[in-house]
Image (cartoon, rainbow, N blue to C red):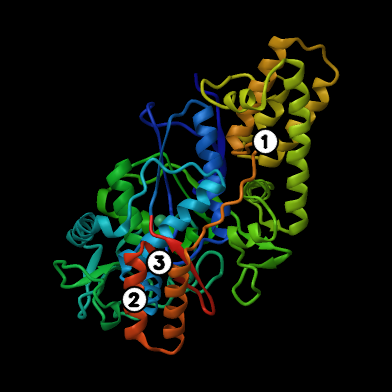
Amino acid sequence: MEIPLHLHDTMTRSVQPLKAEDRKQFRFYCCGPTVYGPAHIGNFRAFLVQDVLRRALEVAGLNPLHVRNLTDVDDKTIRTSQAEGKSLTEFTRFWTEKFHEDSEALNILPPHKEPKATEHIPQQILLVERLAAKGLAYAANDGSVYFKVSAYEPYGKLSRLKEREISTQSTSSSGEQNDADEYDRESVADFALWKSRKPDDGDNFWESPWGEGRPGWHLECSAMSQEYLGDSFDLHAGGIDLCFPHHENEIAQSEGATGKPFARHWFHNAHLMVEGQKMSKSLGNLYTLEDLEEKGFTPMEVRYTLISGHYKQQLNFTFASLKSGRSAMKKMEKAVTKYLEQAGLTEEDFLALAKAPYPTEFGHFQRAWDGIANDLNVSQATGGIFAGFAQLEKVELNTDSILKELKALATVLYAIGIELFQKVEETVIEVPDEVQALGEERWQAKQARDWEKADALRTQLQEAGWQSLDRKDSYDLTPIT
Ligand SMILES: [Zn+2]
């Protein structure tokens, strides 16, 4: 049985019911990470609210099919891999693994499909050919291909931008400057579908009908969502900064090529602030999960804090809020323990209650579930949990009714992805002395700009099953998995 779920839709600027158009699977696409470094908490806020949506869809019986891409070729991945003397594949594999580890620690469910841009080049070329055949794309003299925005009348419908604002693709909807396209195009509003090979690209290029090159970033999401979800699907998600130009460009590419509606619902989350300030490299507040773990916080505390507050509003992430998250979860554990003892159950029994089949009624935790079901209001959900505990104090309970209430609570916690009673285990990677010695020698060679020696030592490290992750002024050794 389906439970109604409602969510704000950016296209119509209104809260809409969520429905699987084909009545079998709720098909949704999320713009994934660019794998060129560790994801920071601002990136993770988007993936976490999408994870809450995914879990809510499961609980509500909408059978989600979740696709999220990996951007493993673009200017940043190419530039950084070259600076580290690694192949693009080796480099992006490393950061993909790191992203997966962090996601797992944050209890983010893996998407059902996670396609990589580099593994879908033929699909992207085909899409450009379809657009060119319809007069929506043109090749420039240098072999790059652009989308002709003036030929696509509905352009801008998602962000509702005026012509003047669209006329430059240089500022995104968050007010950030986009990387300038240094290619020839007819109009500044046009965006690259295919970028011709440049000397800086090194070995990272593919053959195409327009010569050697690589796909433009916007193209991959159109091609891969079509591949795994079809021409039209139920929902598309991303951070609000992606609304323009990225999502606008995706719509133009997909609807331009197929003539069919692209995503039926657009889900955007607002930005993260840190201690009242914008996140930026210069302020040093682009925290990664590792940074926060080093400061003594658990991934579950980070998750609790990043999903609190409404996704449509800016969230101010503070160390004080991390501490409140910690104490909120402790209070929940204390209350749950009391009822478990009354019913003669264990913590493991409680965790097992978080599995399907899910209830359709939530007893004293109904208000908590209603928060989730009504536009993913996680703070109403957590507030509703404490209100539920307060009400339970006032009623007579027997083993059966305790079990029902705990099942309802476990389901709400599953939907927001909060696991109580986590055993915190330290994972310390032991680096063998001889590997440490190789790593250090390589780092010194690199500092001395002796590239040949550094390369040879890197190969030796690889042969020993290890790799070095280089930062600006330090390095880490990790086993190759
Ligand atoms: Zn995208």
- Number of callouts in the render? 3
Near-viewer residue (440 or 401): 440
Residue 423, image x, y percentages: 64, 40
- Residue type, mark 2 in image: Ser
Q: Residue at x 13, y 67 (%)?
A: 209
Q: Specify whether 414 is left or right of 244.
A: right
Which of marks 2 and 1 precedes in the sequence?
2
Q: CA distance from mark 1 to mark 2?
A: 57 Å
User: For numbered disc 2, what is the local secondary structure?
Assistant: loop
- Residue type, mark 3 in image: Gln
Q: Residue at x 50, y 63 (%)?
A: 38
Q: Is mark 3 within 8 Å of ligand 1?
A: no
Which of marks 3 and 2 precedes in the sequence?
2
Q: Residue furthest front?
A: 433
User: What residue is shown with label 1?
Assistant: 421
User: For numbered disc 3, what is the local secondary structure?
Assistant: strand
Q: Residues within 10 Å of mark 3 (few under 14, many from 20)?
A: many
Near-viewer residue (168 or 367): 367
**Residue 231 in sight in this render:** no
Near-viewer residue (455 or 416): 455
Determine which quarter of the picture holds residue 396.
top right
Q: Residue at x 78, y 29 (%)?
A: 335
- Residue type, mark 1 in image: Phe
Q: Residues within 10 Å of mark 2 (few under 14, many from 20)?
A: some
Q: CA distance from mark 1 to mark 3?
A: 34 Å
In front of the other: label 2 or label 3?
Answer: 3
User: What residue is shown with label 3?
Assistant: 467
